[in-house]
Image (cartoon, coloured by chain):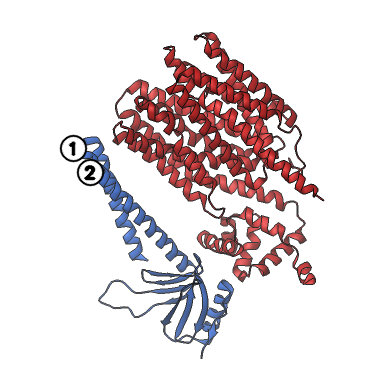
Chain colours: A red, B blue
Amino acid sequence: MIDKNDNLKAAVISNRNLSVIVFSLFFSWLLSFPFEGRILYALADHYHVSAHQFVFGTMASHFAGLLLCGFFIRTMQRAKMLMLFSIVFCIVASGVFFLPPSVLWTAALLAAAFLVGGCVAAWGFFFRSCTPKNERIKTMADGLICSNILMILINMSAVHISPHVGLALSMLILGVAFLFALKLPHQEAMRESELSEAVSISKPLAFLCLFIVVITVNSGLMYQVQGPAFAHLEWLTSWYWAIPYIVALLVMRNLPRKTNRAYILYVAIAMIGFSFIALMVLDRSAASYIVVNTLMLGACGVYDLFWWSILGEMLELNKNPAKVLGIGLSANVLGVLLGGIIGRSITYVNGQSHHPTLLALSIVCVTLVMLPPLHRHLTVLLKNHTYLTALSEMLPQEQTQMIQDFTIMEKLTERESEIASLLLTGKTYRMIAGELYLSENTVKTHVKNIYSKAGVQNRTELMNILLDIKPLSDRLSKS
Amino acid sequence: MKKLIRQAHCLLTMAVLGSMVFTALIFLKPSDWKALAFLSLAIVLVILLLLGKSKQNIRTAQLIIENQIMHIQPAIFKDQGDSFEVFVSCFGILLASKIIKFNQENIRLKSVELGQDFISLTYGNERRTQYTKLLHEKISTDMLNEIARRFSYETGIVPVITN
């Protein structure tokens, strides 16, 4: 007899793959066409028009679509309808580009970018429903990897065969996306616990958005400063551009759970800085492009997966995942837009001298200075938030018993159990240090030892273990 | 501790000078400036790595001093400026500028033996164990018991008191 849970699990697993496939297909169209895509630039070159007149308007429209989607799409059924309609509209809008340039091009791009923004945000419903909470980073990595591989294929056909072949291929991919999207579920699967809206996520989400905007300004700068510098190497840039990004995603996806990802983020910050230094110092040969692009896109891969996975975790904290994902991703687009505007104005003013790169580097330095405190604050906010939500639902006696059982189980010293008790009431290190007349450094070291004994990396994982601990009295009576 | 801080200051000065040389090379562009710029950048990076290590050592030393259980001050030599101080804490031992860590980074304190004029500590990880014995002036029984109590409270290890 097949267990109902096994059936549900099998359905969830296949829905997960389905949601990844649908995402990969329509996202590859987005990357290769409207969002600074190679097809758009190739078509513009083919017809001898400037692509820049389209790019910024398209990005602004995409930003609006992402931001507004969550306010209108509130159920999975509506999300599926929007996705199906958007895909069909984007196929029709892409067809307009077989005609010579006209006002139709602008109208089609703006409308398609707006709708596909809504489509991406609406996909949040399927991201949350079809993927278990601890596998969201893998789902996201799979989606981004597959979409970038497809984008490379489309770009190469647009550059090496013809822009119209690339366009046709992208439309075919959208058609396949439509067929798979028809099979997506239209109701959320049964979930273990109902979400509570009593705890607001607006502060953590606002900080996360600020974090994303600051990082992605560099991506926008990259498009406008680094991209044109190697425009003559189209035979290389058409395929190598996304390779370091894909490799970084693969590495981050397969890291063991206990790896401290915070160090990797700081390495990625350094890589962004070095990429701009390399751009300034090196020539414009293929080898130089490989160095510059590897550093920049490798860092982008690390960061993109980092904040996409945080957004994935935050989907649990709000009834409308389209709103959370849409607002978070709109911050990404805003950062790219701002970086693009700054980069464009720098190259327009100063042409080919080193000054544009130096100015870009100084902007990178500002972001490098801002990022570590932002990241620290965000991590504390998110961890405390997730943690406190769970703890607030327990009775005081339950909390005390839980802490006592944990102390005995993990063989904590008296000092460690004293600190653990305060840690589990949601106090910060500074507050614990003040209460026990210790330094913050001392508290941090004791907490590291507690985590090490429990085999966890952070307070949230500790809480997860504690919530799984059966009362000691139960275990003793059973033995 | 002062020696550690002096080391850090020297490294910081060298890093700043190296950065200034790098920036000057970028702007002035003498002959072979690219090779020199890369060299200076590499040197600055190495210094920054050493500075990071040095900062870590200072933090560990501060941790030991803040959580000291015993402070041993050996004989002070009148004709030499520096004194040689020893701090024993639940996180390690600080011998002037040399640091021995335990109860951090997977190194555990395994046993403590206390006598009126010595303290010996055994520490290590699963593969290696080390033993350190420090001699000091005689202390009272009350102080001995207090040190034992603090070790037990902070580290969970109950010291063996030897008469």
Q: Is residue A290 left or right of residue A469?
A: left
Give above or below for B39 relative to A177: below
Give residue A116's position: percent from left, percent from top: 61, 24
Give above or below for B118 relative to A350: below
Q: Farthest residue to the right: give it.
A: A1
Q: Amino acid at mark 1?
A: Pro
Q: Is residue A225 visible?
A: no
How far apart marks 1 and 2 lie (CA) works out to 9 Å
Give residue B44's position: percent from left, percent from top: 30, 49
- Read off the residue under disc 2: B36
Give residue A432's position: percent from left, percent from top: 59, 59
The residue at 50%/49% (across/down) is: A262
The residue at 66%/58% (across/down) is: A424
- Read off the residue under disc 1: B30
Quadrant of res A133: top right
Q: Is residue A60 left or right of residue A423?
A: left
